[in-house]
Image: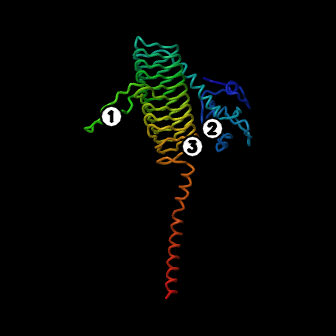
């Protein structure tokens, strides 16, 4: 697929500067791009490469002032980074839309209802009473259990497993190896020290425009639903336990874990390897730093916490500053002790 600078500028509402007829067919980093590729410049640290790049087209911020002549055609936009992301999204959509049909071997139950222009790759399984919307793409090895509903434009990458009764909204993307709807970790301790499994009869609901990374697990609810709300973004290797609710536009980085029945508010940001205990609430706009351990509810909106147990980030910075001063404080204390001993010794001498 080839696109001219004029076509690209029209798509992202930019202004061309140079040869608007030049065409590109792929993307590249500004420091490595070759002829026929499109690059972008958003970080001033990379501006030096603008004057040496071999890229045919470069997206730049509209307020960029050139210091030297360049060979590439520029497309000026308000935000080059955002415009580049838009182009990548469109490029991926075009490539994905070309996939359609049902490859063999695959299994599709007779009771399943399939929408238009879907793609089912080889070795996929679609169970009883499954409902699949339009333009859905299921890549190799995807498992869709009985009574699952998948809405329009959703993409399940290779090896994704969706257990029975789960519901996926529109424009959901789930990456390879993720499991949605496996049993929650529910066991009742018995008098003899053993554990009795508690059946997990709920489901998982993933709302529209959610993206979930590779090898993440989202457990089904004991009763009711585990819910990932619209616009949430989950990284790779995340554990979401039973009956958790992840709020709209919340983002969670890799290796984080959220324990059962905890509710995350809207626009929460959670760093990598953070852990959150069960049955608490996290207020809207909260920020939880990487490797933090959250042991109690965060009740005030837009709070930032860090550490284990997690506490206010500003207070943590003050504590760290104080900690760095401890050697100097110890030195001063020793000097004061020495001075006190001298004064006491002089007092005893004077008394005699």
Q: CA distance from mark 3 to mark 2?
A: 38 Å
Coordinates of residue 160 in the picture (x, y in percent): 43, 26
The residue singled out by tag 1 in the image is 188
Q: Position of residue 266 (x, y in %)?
A: 56, 34
Instruction: Identify the element where label 3 is drawn.
Output: loop
Q: Are marks 1 and 2 in contact (CB under 8 Å)?
A: no
* Image coords of residue 22 (percent x, y): 69, 27
Q: Residue furthest bottom?
A: 352
Q: Residue furthest front?
A: 351
Secondary element at image label 1: strand
Q: CA distance from mark 1 to mark 3?
A: 35 Å
Going from N to C along the chain, the mark reached first, 1 or 3, is 1
Quadrant where the image shows the N terminus = top right
Secondary structure of the residue carrying tag 2 is loop
Determine crowd level at label 3: few under 14, some 14-19, many 20+ residues with C-alpha closer than 10 A.
Answer: some
Q: Residue furthest left?
A: 192
Q: Earlier in the sequence, mark 1 or mark 2?
A: 2
Foreground label between 3 and 2: 3
Q: Say which residue appears at 52% left-offset and 83% top-offset.
A: 347
Circle 1 residues within 10 Å: few <14, some 14–19, many ≥20: few
Q: Nearer the viewer, residue 346 or 329?
A: 346
Q: Are marks 3 and 2 in contact (CB under 8 Å)?
A: no
Residue 30's disc number: 2
Q: Which residue is mark 3?
A: 303
Q: Residues within 10 Å of mark 2 (few under 14, many from 20)?
A: many
137 w.r.t. 258: above or below: above
Point 50% across, 41% down: residue: 297
């Amino acid at each position: 697929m080839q696109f001219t600078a004029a076509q690209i500028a029209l798509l992202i509402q930019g202004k061309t500067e140079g040869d608007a007829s030049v065409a590109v067919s792929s993307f590249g980093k500004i420091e490595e791009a070759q002829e026929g590729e499109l690059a972008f410049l958003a970080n001033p640290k990379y501006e030096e490469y603008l004057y040496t790049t071999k890229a045919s087209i470069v997206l730049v911020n509209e307020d960029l002032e050139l210091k030297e002549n360049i060979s590439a055609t520029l497309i000026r936009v308000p935000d080059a980074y955002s415009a580049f992301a838009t182009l990548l999204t469109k490029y991926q959509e075009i490539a994905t839309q070309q996939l359609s049909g049902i490859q063999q071997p695959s299994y599709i139950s007779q009771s399943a209802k399939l929408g238009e222009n879907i793609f089912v790759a080889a070795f996929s399984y679609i169970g009883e009473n499954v409902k699949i919307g339009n333009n859905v793409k299921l890549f190799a090895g995807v498992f869709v259990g009985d009574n699952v509903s998948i809405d329009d434009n959703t993409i399940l990458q290779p090896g994704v497993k969706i257990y029975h009764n789960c519901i996926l909204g529109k424009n959901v993307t789930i990456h390879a190896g993720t499991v949605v709807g496996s049993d929650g970790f529910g066991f009742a301790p018995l008098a003899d020290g053993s554990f009795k499994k508690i059946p997990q009869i709920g489901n998982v609901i993933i709302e529209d425009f959610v993206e979930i990374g590779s090898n993440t697990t989202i457990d089904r609810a004991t009763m009711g639903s585990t819910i990932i709300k619209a616009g949430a973004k989950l990284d790779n290797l995340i554990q979401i336990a039973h009956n958790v609710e992840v709020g709209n536009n919340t983002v969670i980085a890799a290796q984080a874990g959220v324990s059962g029945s905890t509710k995350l508010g809207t626009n929460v940001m959670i760093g990598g390897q953070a852990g959150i205990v069960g049955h608490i609430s996290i207020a809207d706009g909260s920020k939880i730093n990487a490797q933090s351990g959250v042991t109690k509810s965060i009740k005030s909106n837009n709070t930032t916490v860090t550490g284990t147990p997690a506490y206010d980030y500003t207070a943590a910075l003050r504590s760290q500053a104080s900690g760095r001063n401890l050697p100097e404080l110890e030195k001063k204390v020793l000097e004061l002790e020495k001075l006190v001993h001298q004064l006491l010794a002089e007092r005893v001498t004077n008394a005699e």
